[in-house]
Image (tube, rainbow, N blue to C red):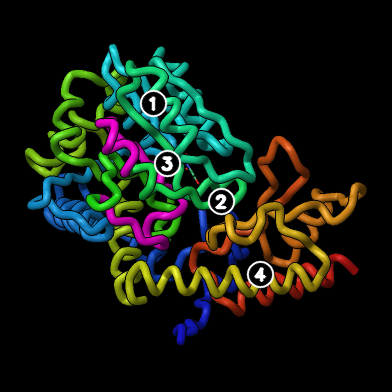
Amino acid sequence: MLKQVQHDETNKMDKLLFTPGPLTTSKTVKEAMLHDYGSRDTKFVNIVKEVRENLLQLGGVSKEKGYETVIIQGSGTFGIEATISSSVPRNGHLLIVINGAYGHRMANICSVHGIKYTSLVFAENEIPTIEKTEAALKSDNSITHLAIVHSETTTGIFNPIKEFGALAGNYNKTYIVDAMSSFGAVPVYIAEFNIDFLVSSSNKCIEGVPGFSFIIAKREKLLQCKGQARSLVLDIFAQWEALENDGQFRFTPPTQSLAAFHQALKELETEGGVEARANRYKENYQTLISGMRKLGFKEYLEPEKQGYIITSFLYPSADFNFKEFYNSLNDKGFVIYPGKLTQADCFRIGNIGRLYKKDVEGLLEAIESVLK
Ligand SMILES: *Cc1c(COP(=O)(O)O)cnc(C)c1O
């Protein structure tokens, strides 16, 4: 059974965030930020060291196995941009498997940097297929890299990153995974999945606050990034080298955000690790969809494609006023999220962050009363 944790005072004061991030965090995570650390302070340097080691463990890898962690200031997109613009060489070519807005964002990054790319676009309610991706790899042998999003936050669909990793391995392509809204709550075995670069951020399933993204990279691939970056601040090799040399960031680190994340990682472990967190989010998800169905809402995705991170719901009628719905829920202390789909009118409700079944039940009651 899941431990039901009483919400603390700050969480009673703040609205609950049923969004893809920033998320509701625990009081103790927020309290970890009540310190001023100098960036060279031994305490802070140790926090960074432990965070980097801990992230490798979460991905089932280690330095001994040949993996490294790089932390990049900024939100998740900074980490994606840093990875793509540092890892794809001048004569490289990235194949991007797309079934949502975050896949398109990777294409956008390539076009800004003048990186050669091919978009392989699937419908937003469709799981990309190995067959079509394999055909794309076969049809152009200039392709060097393959990228995909794990949990496409646009809809909440889960993509089979293990199978795509095997494909990348068979064709000897460098494999990049955007695991932003899954890492920490969906088991990912970086070595077994053949992932060369996994990117996630501080304010998603690990339940820290915004401030940085992190990259878990196969060392051999990371070393190949040397001298390849198209940006000074987003150079993942240079950033890694500095962290390795003296534990220092090249530019001002987000000290409070790292302290909060350090605490969030401890709380993930206390909860029982990735599996326990997955179970809490799954319980939130089940509570949400059964309650929403009772209220007459329908999910956008077929249930077997739907992950347990975030769910897109169709507008219940053509004259549904989302703005009013959103504002009324907001007044009751519940923050939901607009849709991002190109094909259908939807809104989204996230299950992640320091939220429990009873919080979802609270949200459902609020929705019921708003509908009336
Ligand atoms: C949150 C998220 C990102 C990063 O978005 P930011 O706004 O930069 O934090 C990237 N990919 C996915 C799938 C995400 O859910």
Q: Tell me the SS state at disc 2.
A: strand
The magenta segment is 166-190
Image marks 3 and 2: residues in contact by CB distance under 8 Å:
no
In the image, 310 versus 15, the foreground residue is 310
Mark 3 is surrounded, within 10 Å at the Cα level, by few (under 14), some (14 to 19) or many (20 or more) other residues, namely many
Is 175 one of the magenta-colored residues? yes
- Disc with the residue nearer the chain's start (3 vs 2): 3
The residue where tag 3 is placed is: 76
- Disc with the residue nearer the chain's start (3 vs 1): 3
In the image, 363 versus 32, the foreground residue is 363
The residue where tag 1 is placed is: 137
Q: CA distance from mark 3 to mark 1?
A: 27 Å
Image point (33%, 71%), residue name: 273
Q: Looking at numbered disc 1 in the image, what kind of residue is underneath it?
A: Leu
Left or right: 29 with respect to 37?
Answer: right
Q: Looking at numbered disc 4 in the image, what kind of residue is underneath it?
A: Leu
Residue 57: image x %, image y %? 21, 60
Q: Looking at numbered disc 3 in the image, what kind of residue is underneath it?
A: Gly
Image point (29%, 31%), residue name: 171
The residue where tag 4 is placed is: 288
Q: Looking at numbered disc 2 in the image, what kind of residue is underneath it?
A: Ile
Q: Is mark 3 within 8 Å of ligand 1?
A: yes
Residue 206: image x %, image y %? 39, 60
The residue where tag 2 is placed is: 157
Instruction: Give the overall secondary structure of the magenta segment.
Output: loop
Residue 338: image x %, image y %? 69, 47
